[in-house]
Amino acid sequence: MRTFKYLLLSLVALTLNSCRIYNFTGTGKIDAKTFQVNYFQNNAPLVQPGIERTFTLKLQDLIQNQTNLNLTSSNGDLLYEGEITGYTITPMSATAAQTAAQNRLTITINVRFVNKNKDTDNFEKPFSFYYDYPGDQQLIGSNLTAALDVIFERITQDIFNESLAKW
């Protein structure tokens, strides 16, 4: 019985100890305490006003929700910056009347990531995703909000995975 208690205690100790090395987001042990997300300028040829602010806030929220890092406005251990370089709407399929049956909104964001504690993690890379919608709808109001939610959720998760999760 005494051996069982030691075995159980050892198992619990190892389990609790390993939680510091890995967590459910896959970030593992991060050598940083703070992160900084600079404002992403909208440099796309076709400009949709306000998406740069929406994207910047969504990236900040995702990192705050999936890590224990503190957001700072300057001198962050991890730095995210970049610009929106593409906002395009293209027809994906046509009707018999030669109008678009389906359109695709594609957004591309160039991201520069700097880890001040580990230079080998640094990168500059474009991230892109799309949203398909019916050709008879305009991308305004709630339709635009839904499209941006889908696109930005995917892009921010891809940025998170590339910079912290290493997936």
Image: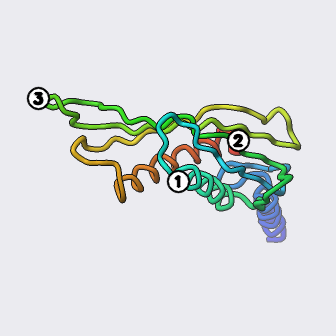
Residue 133 in the image, given as x and y percentages of width and height:
30, 44
**As displayed, is residue 163 above or below residue 57?**
above
Return the residue at label 1: 50
- Nearer to us of marks 2 and 1 is 1
At label 2, the amino acid type is Ser
The answer to whether marks 2 and 1 mark residues whose Cβ atoms lie closer than 8 Å is no
Q: Secondary structure at mark 3?
A: loop
Q: Which quadrant does the C terminus fall into? A: top right
Q: Earlier in the sequence, mark 2 or mark 1?
A: 1
Decide which of 52, 8 is in the foreground and name it: 52
Left or right: residue 105 compared with residue 65: left
Which numbered circle lies on residue 163? 2
Left or right: residue 124 compared with residue 62: right
Residue 122 in the image, given as x and y percentages of width and height:
78, 35
Q: Which quadrant does the N terminus fall into? A: bottom right
Q: Secondary structure at mark 1?
A: loop
Query: Residue lying furthest right in this view?
Result: 117
